[in-house]
Image: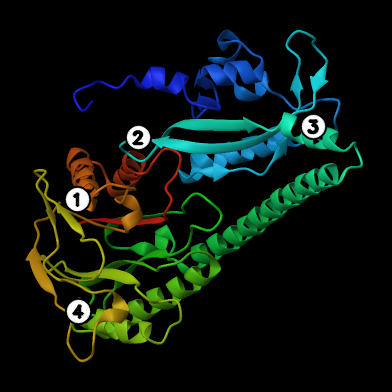
Amino acid sequence: MTDSVIDYAAMFQCLPGMVALLTPELVYADVNEEFVRGSGRSREQLIGRYVFDVFPDNPNDPAATGMRNLEASLYRVLATGERDAMALQRYDVEDPDRPGEWAERYWSPVNAPVLGPDGKVLLIVHRVEEVTELIRARGRAGGRNSRARVLEAELYTRARELQELNERLRQAHSREREVALALQEAMLPARRQVSRHHRAAVRYRPAVGALNVCGDWYDLVELVDGHRIGVSVGDVVGHGLAAAGVMGQLRSALSAASRVAAGPAQALDVLGRYAHVVDGAESATAVTTFIDFERQTITYSSAGHPPPVLVQPDGRTRFLDQATDTPLDARPDPIPRPQAETVFTPGTTLVLYTDGLIERRREDIDAGLARLADALRRHRDQDPETLADTVLLELLPSGGATDDTALIIVRL
């Protein structure tokens, strides 16, 4: 058996239950034989067609919600890359031989993603179990007033209530997301404030979904001697308003510490002690660099964060990974954090980022780092603003990432 080639196309056709493959545009890519039989449509009436052109809501039922509920589930799968099981649905189907006549049908759907190597959703597996006959049979068992019929109606009602409750929760989370994003925007320095004297670009991209937002931050400050700047990024574990609040506290604390610290390691030491007393700062990470333009040096230190990357004018790339330590709240006092120093030549590009830019589900982080280095190498001649947009376009999934991303690029 181990030497045999499995015919997955034939296996798909033999799957028990109704199974369809949908494209990200919600077009039927394939259906198994059971789906053809159960839907009452031929393959020609399904393949290549938009799902809701084939199965619209019953226009004679003003309360019909089957199409809207299914559409919301499918878009959740596309946005999150996660499986979504739906509550029991009443979704009437038009008789293909009698246009205008609609049959009452009940379905139990499950939608699951098929992910590509880059983590993007390539297809959606749409599996449905029809339970119409089960509901009818239970109703016939003792007449329409039977206890079974009452229980079935109760089950359907509760399923509808649960789905409506979930929708209200999603709307509430969406409102929280809007507030958190506004708070994030207010607390992060604006692009025009990032640097008045140095070529720099900053970007923040929130994650898809209502809750996955507002843990990442960036900062760029002029240091007191006038010829150095501090450039930092950080990541707070958690999402929503609470994470946005913690992010603001940590960013402000590091910004203040950097102005008086002897170096980045000392600034992170101060920030780590502060993180110990901030609820929600557990396992937060940060990396900070002090750039000295007179000496043409970069001094850096990392508290559990992915390493910055230097891109030479000739295309050589190097990760600054010689001073990596534990997250902010995990360093025991009074052991100082490590720091390292490197030199640069004019025209070199320094890039700091958060893990949302490089991490992908079921992929080693080294693959993401290599992908970042390759993009920076190929586009190194672009100005920082253009380069920032190019890197986000190439590295973030087209459907949106499941973690937020901060990016800062400085041309030295």
Q: Quadrant of the N terminus?
A: top left
Q: Earlier in the sequence, mark 4 or mark 1?
A: 4
Numbered mark located on residue 116 in the image: 2
Task: Tell me the distance, in whole angstroms, between the alpha carbons under discs 1 and 2.
Answer: 18 Å
Indicate which disc, 2 or 4, sits on the residue closer to the N terminus.
Answer: 2
**Residue 383: quadrant of the picture:** top left
Please say if the residues under marks 3 and 4 sit with CB atoms less than 8 Å apart.
Answer: no
- The quadrant the C terminus occupies is bottom left
Query: Marks 2 and 3: in contact by CB < 8 Å?
Result: no
Residue sitting at the far bottom:
334
Q: Residues within 10 Å of mark 4 (few under 14, many from 20)?
A: many
Circle 2 crowding by C-alpha within 10 Å: few under 14, some 14–19, many from 20: few
Q: Nearer the viewer, residue 349 or 161?
A: 161
Q: Nearer the viewer, mark 3 or mark 2?
A: 3
* Label of residue 366 in the image: 1
Q: Position of residue 81 (x, y in %)?
A: 45, 43
Residue annotated with mark 4: 265
Q: Residue at x 79, y 32 (%)?
A: 136
Q: Which one is earlier in the sequence, the residue at label 3 or at label 4?
A: 3
The answer to whether 56 appears left or right of 80 in the picture is right
Q: Is residue 197 above or below residue 11?
A: below
Identified by mark 1, the residue type is Asp
380 above or below 332?
A: above
Gap between marks 3 and 1 measured at Cα: 56 Å
Residue on which the image places disc 3: 136
Whether residue 348 appears in this view of the structure is no
Q: Give the CA distance from mark 2 to mark 4.
A: 40 Å
Residue 291 is situated, as x and y percent measured from the top left of the image, at 18, 68
Looking at the rendered structure, the kind of residue marked 3 is Arg
For marks 3 and 2 on the same chain, the one whose residue lies earlier in the sequence = 2
Instruction: Pick the residue in front: 202 or 236.
Output: 236
User: In the picture provided, is 326 more to the left or to the right than 405?
Assistant: left
